Amino acid sequence: MTKQERLRALHEKWFSKCTCALKKTATQPVPGDGSAHAQIVFIGEAPGKSEDMQGRPFVGAAGKFLTEMLESINLKRDDVYITNIVKYRPPNNRNPEPSEKEACRAWLTEELNVIQPKVIVFLGRHAMNTFFPGEQISKVHGKLLVKKFPYIETTYFLPLYHPAAALYDGSMRETLKKDFKKITHILKKIQ
Ligand code: URA
């Protein structure tokens, strides 16, 4: 099986296996999307309304901003892999509960183990705190974190502000755009 086929098979498996309580209220699951050979995986929080309707991550306003930032470093969405901690939309876009994050956790780990990216980029505190519970996004955004976890190969992690939070806050938006540009340098450094 190719990596792309392995990804498709694991999503199919988790569509029925995932025990996330949000399944009851969401329209459909929103699995990760993009290249199975990506060097960079972006991890967001949870699908919003547009994602819930289309079944694809980051296709609403925050997704448009993410696509613009990717283009600013000469990358297309198809060059990277984009996924979320939680694969089902929380009602009214509330924060995901710890039990919901936990229910979708093994699904995420399996995605990461197929792709084995060079760097994992956290979009916002929910994604970052799943791996680094003690860190604060306001302190570590744009800083490369290096850690070996027992369950994934990737050791480089870059926390960024969430594009949705930055959309309506001018100074956060500029910080995010500046932090985002560090991805190119980081990829060169860790080749
Ligand atoms: N915000 C997220 O965290 N994920 C999406 O897929 C869309 C918006």
Image (cartoon, grey):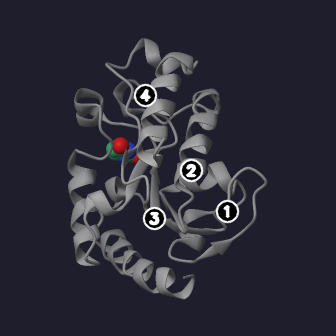
Residue 167 seen in the figure: no
Marks 4/2: CA–CA distance:
18 Å
Residue farthest top in this picture: 24
Q: Which amino acid, by three-letter code, is at mark 3?
A: Ile
Callout 4 secondary element: loop
| Other-residue count near label 2 (Cα within 10 Å), few / some / many at <14 / 14–19 / ≥20 | many
Give the number of the mark in front: 2 or 1.
2
Give the labeled residue for mark 1. Answer: 135
Count numbered badges in the picture: 4
Please state which amino acid type lies under the numbered disc 1.
Answer: Glu
The quarter holding residue 125 reads: bottom right
User: Residue 1, image x and y in percent?
Assistant: 49, 41
Tell me the residue that label 2 is attached to: 112
Relative to 120, residue 102 above or below: above
- Report if the CB atoms under discs 1 and 3 are less than 8 Å apart: no
Marked residue nearer the N-terminal end (1 or 3):
3
- The residue identified by callout 3 is 40
- For ligand 1, give the image quadrant: top left
Quick one: label 2 or label 1, which is nearer the N terminus?
A: 2
x and y percentages locating residue 173 in the rendered image: 31, 69
Cα distance, mark 2 to mark 3?
10 Å
Left or right for 123, reference 111 = left
Decide: few, some or many residues near mark 1? Use Cα within 10 Å; few <14, some 14-19, many ≥20: some
Distance of mark 1 from mark 3, alpha carbons? 21 Å
Q: Residues within 10 Å of mark 3 (few under 14, many from 20)?
A: many
How far apart are labels 2 and 1 at the CA level? Answer: 21 Å
Mark 1 lies on a secondary structure that is loop
Tell whether 160 sits left or right of 175: right
User: To which residue does mark 4 refer?
Assistant: 88
Q: Mark 4 against mark 2, which lies toward the viewer?
A: 2
